[in-house]
Amino acid sequence: AQSVTQLGSHVSVSEGALVLLRCNYSSSVPPYLFWYVQYPNQGLQLLLKYTTGATLVKGINGFEAEFKKSETSFHLTKPSAHMSDAAEYFCAVSRAGRDDKIIFGKGTRLHILP
Amino acid sequence: GAGVSQTPSNKVTEKGKYVELRCDPISGHTALYWYRQSLGQGPEFLIYFQGTGAADDSGLPNDRFFAVRPEGSVSTLKIQRTERGDSAVYLCASSLTLGTGELFFGEGSRLTVL
């Protein structure tokens, strides 16, 4: 069975500082990996995804994530946090080419300190 | 509308009652997903459809839960004999096709069972 573990249910960073949200996955077959974001009072939206090819993927709003198979990780980063980045972030996994059941982690709430 | 529409946005019911939650996906999207999100948790997979058929219903918690998509567009999640533990936000998402991992979520239907 597939699963994702997000380290830290809450992360606080200062405006302008590096954002690092951690995600480790477990999958018996090659995974597809995703980060979704949920802004207050809005539905979840896709930030970025890894399917095949380049292991460093770029998403919207300056976010990027790197697929590291050896570490079973897919951490999300942004060089400089902005107040508007405050939201809940979800890492998710599916089985590449097998099915489309997408399994989400518990989420990390990102707080931006002025 | 342009996005995924879910109705009702809020539903309060009494234990033992029957509830229907409706999802209207983005026009032309063939894949439709239902998730459930409890407070402090990530979205929990329930079921997904490709067209009219349920491709994977392994996440439905028990036989009180049932979902249909008779014409391959609108879907209804049906919950019989509701229990207090069914209280959650029920999320619907649609995708242009299977395999993209790009789900477009609605804002959810908040179900409260008293």
Image: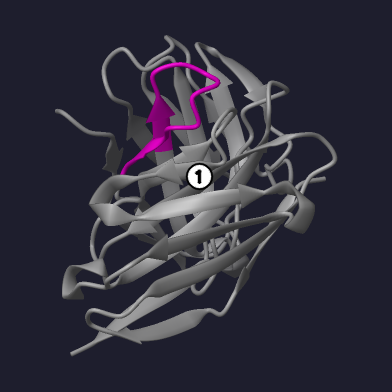
Whether residue B44 is visible, yes or no, is no
What secondary structure prevails in the magenta region? Answer: loop
**As drawn, B72 above or below B67:** above
Q: Chain of mark 1?
A: A
State the image coordinates of residue A49 (x, y, percent, origin top left): 48, 40
| x then y, percent, for residue B105 | 35, 41
Task: Check the image and report above or below for B72 versus A30.
Answer: above
Figure quadrant of residue B24: top left
The answer to whether residue B88 shows anywhere in this view is: yes
Q: Is residue B10 magenta?
A: no
Q: Quadrant of the C terminus of chain A?
A: bottom left
Identified at 51% across, 65% down, the residue is B87
Horizontally, is A38 left or right of A24 in the view? Answer: left
Q: Is residue B52 above or below residue A32?
A: above
Q: Residue at x 61, y 48 (%)?
A: A67
The stretch in magenta equals B93-106
Q: Is residue B111 left or right of residue A26?
A: left
- The residue at 25%/68% (across/down) is A85
Amino acid, disc 1:
Leu
Q: Which residue is mark 1?
A: A56
Which element type, helix, strand or loop, lies under badge 1?
Answer: strand
